[in-house]
Image: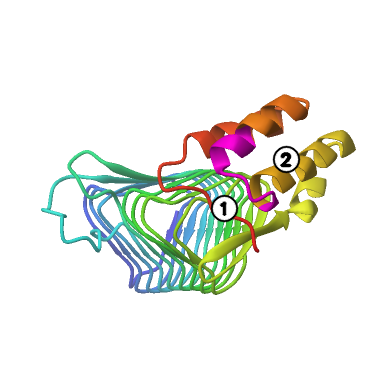
């Protein structure tokens, strides 16, 4: 363990033997940091926060501070961060609001400088939140999602797997899996072809997803009728089933296509 002499580690904090803590950093008494993780200069980690293995936390990040939510009443809530996450300069991540609630982050995510993860968010694996990307409370992000710089995601919105949101977008409804979305408010422009190809999705599935997107987002049909048509006309795959289930389970509604 390498802890700079100016760092403050409160009694009760649990740090693995090889954790590194830089100058003037602060680690609170209820924090647990697992092996291989480094904490940068002036970073603050507090609250009931658990950070996994091999994470990199850069200077000025504030992890586990109380929610920016007027409903918060000082009750015990949690922040759980997985392995191999990169948390860049001045990122802020808050725990849950209600007693016993949790903000959870999976593995191998990149949070670029000044991005924000609010209370009760659920974030999967291998996502990228670009500079000043802002997630309001209760946002859910699946896996391999890209959120562009300065984009703002409304409370309770879900971002589906392998989707990409353009910079400066205003996202007030769910972003469908496999989509490219942009705008104010955000609209579906088409498939995230680059992401799908990198994920090695087959050509047959790509063609079926293209047909599905035309029906869902460009046909002018209501979403319920578009779903019925889609189920009748297109061969089922894991990706298509995920898309259908995502749309059908949406509570805020799904972003529509551009006109």
Instruction: State which region is magenta.
Output: 218-227
Label 2 CA crowd tier, 10 Å (few <14, some 14–19, many 20+): many
Q: Secondary structure at mark 2?
A: helix
Picture residue at 22% right of the left edge, 50% below the top? 97
Q: Nearer the viewer, residue 33 or 8?
A: 33
- Mark 2 vs mark 1: give the one in front: 2
Whole-percent x and y of residue 118? Answer: 35, 58
Instruction: Identify the mark at residue 212; answer none if there is no mark.
Output: 2
Question: Image point 25% across, 63% down: which residue?
Answer: 68
Residue 172's place in the image compared with 104, above or below, is below
Earlier in the chain: of badge 2 and badge 1, it is 1
Q: Which residue is mark 1?
A: 109
Please tell me which residue lies in front, 53 or 77.
Answer: 77
Residue in view at x 61 percent, y 48 percent: 126
Quadrant position of residue 93:
bottom left
Residue 162 x/y as whole percent: 66, 48
Observer able to see residue 201 = no
Q: Position of residue 43 (x, y in %)?
A: 38, 68
Q: Does residue 219 belong to the magenta stretch?
A: yes
Distance from label 2 to label 1 (Cα)?
Answer: 29 Å
């Amino acid at each position: 363990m390498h802890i700079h002499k100016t760092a403050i580690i409160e009694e009760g904090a649990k740090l693995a033997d090889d954790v590194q803590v830089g100058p003037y950093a602060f680690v609170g008494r209820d924090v647990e940091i697992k092996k291989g993780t480094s904490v940068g200069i002036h970073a603050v980690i507090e609250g009931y926060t658990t950070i996994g293995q091999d994470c990199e936390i850069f200077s000025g990040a504030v992890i586990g501070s109380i929610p920016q939510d007027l409903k918060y009443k000082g009750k015990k809530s949690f922040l759980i961060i997985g392995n191999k996450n990169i948390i860049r300069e001045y990122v802020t991540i808050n725990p849950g609001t209600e007693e016993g609630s949790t903000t959870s982050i999976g593995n191998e995510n990149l949070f670029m400088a000044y991005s924000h993860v609010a209370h009760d968010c659920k974030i999967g694996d291998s996502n990228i939140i670009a500079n000043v990307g802002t997630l309001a409370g209760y946002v859910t992000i699946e896996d391999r999602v890209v959120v562009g710089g300065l984009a703002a995601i409304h409370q309770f919105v879900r971002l589906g797997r392998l989707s990409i949101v353009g910079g400066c977008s205003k996202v007030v409804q769910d972003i469908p899996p496999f989509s490219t979305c942009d705008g104010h408010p955000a609209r579906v422009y088409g498939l995230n072809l680059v992401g799908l190809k990198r994920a090695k999705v087959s050509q047959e599935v790509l063609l079926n997803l293209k047909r599905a997107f035309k029906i869902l987002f460009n046909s002018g049909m209501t979403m319920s009728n578009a779903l019925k048509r889609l189920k009748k006309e297109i061969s089922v795959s894991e990706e298509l089933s995920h898309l259908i289930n995502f749309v059908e389970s949406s509570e805020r509604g799904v972003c529509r296509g551009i006109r």
